[in-house]
Amino acid sequence: MLTTPSFEERDDRRAHERLCVATRLVRPVDTLIRLVPSPDGTLTPDLKRVLPGRGVWVTANRASFNEAMRRKAFARSLKRPVEVPPTLPDMVEMLLERAVLDMLSFANKAGLVISGFAKVIDALDSERLSQRIVAVIQARDGAEDGARKLAQAVRRAYLDKNVPDTIMNLDSAHLDLALGRTNVIHAALCAGPAATGFLDRVAALAFWRDGGLASAEDVPSREAPLQADDEPSTQDAAPSQDGDDVI
């Protein structure tokens, strides 16, 4: 006997995978961004998957967002008129960038960040650090000479083994804000949970900016079944509770 799905069964925040409305591929939710219509019908990003209501999902890069907007796929998936602001992709990028900087600030408060060119070079050359350096940061608007010297110090210290990530997609003004200092161009990040969270968010921001439209060859993904965007996932998990802010 057919029964009406319960609220939890209809709640798309609980899914492990959803349909991308741009590519029509079913993908893990960690590779997607959820959007929900606000009470006035404006489509709103819900990066932490906490807003109530039926959501629509799209692969977490600008190319997929642009494709979904071009095809008017959001309203078609939601089966209702929605207002899609033309600045929506810029809004998502701002939220992703803010998440990166918030986590960098958290890592700094946890004592995991070394800032200043001389201190970073000294840390790379030192064997006295109790924690391994997992990333070095050069501001996007920093001088090329500084980036070259930083890369040389990394090669000298690590000899191409367990080399820290090099991050160059943040502006100096953003680093200033996150670290509570002025004119921050270089920093290093030591290992720790906050550092892992920061690197995950940096990767998400980089994918947003540089990722192209997903294809059927991308892993993991699969072709959507008929009307997959209308069906609740059979794989449920609790909604994200990462932080207090809804973004």
Image: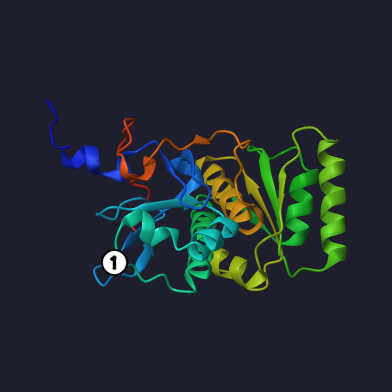
Q: Position of residue 241 (x, y in %)?
A: 33, 46
Q: Position of residue 15 (x, y in %)?
A: 35, 38
User: Image quadrant for the N terminus?
Assistant: top left
Q: Which residue is mark 1?
A: 38
* 121 and 23: which is toward the camera: 23
Q: Position of residue 105 (x, y in %)?
A: 51, 58
Q: Residue at x 48, y 39 (%)?
A: 27
Q: Residue at x 81, y 45 (%)?
A: 154
* 247 and 133: which is toward the camera: 247
Label 1: element kind: loop
Q: Residue at x 31, y 30 (%)?
A: 234
Instruction: Please identify the residue farthest to the front as the structure is shown.
Output: 226
206 versus 127 height, above or below: below
Q: Residue at x 66, y 38 (%)?
A: 132
Q: How is the image coloured?
A: rainbow
Q: Position of residue 208 (x, y in %)?
A: 58, 56
12 versus 117 height, above or below: above
Residue 246 is at least partly visible in this image: no
Q: Callout 1 environment at 10 Å: few (<14), some (14 to 19), or many (20+)?
A: some
Q: The residue under label 1 is which amino acid type?
A: Ser
84 versus 246 height, above or below: below
* 11 and 144: which is toward the camera: 11
User: Image quadrant for the C terminus?
Assistant: bottom left
Residue 51 is at least partly visible in this image: yes
Location of residue 174 by image quarter = bottom right
Location of residue 104 by image quarter = bottom right
* In this rendering, position of residue 107 left or right of residue 45: right
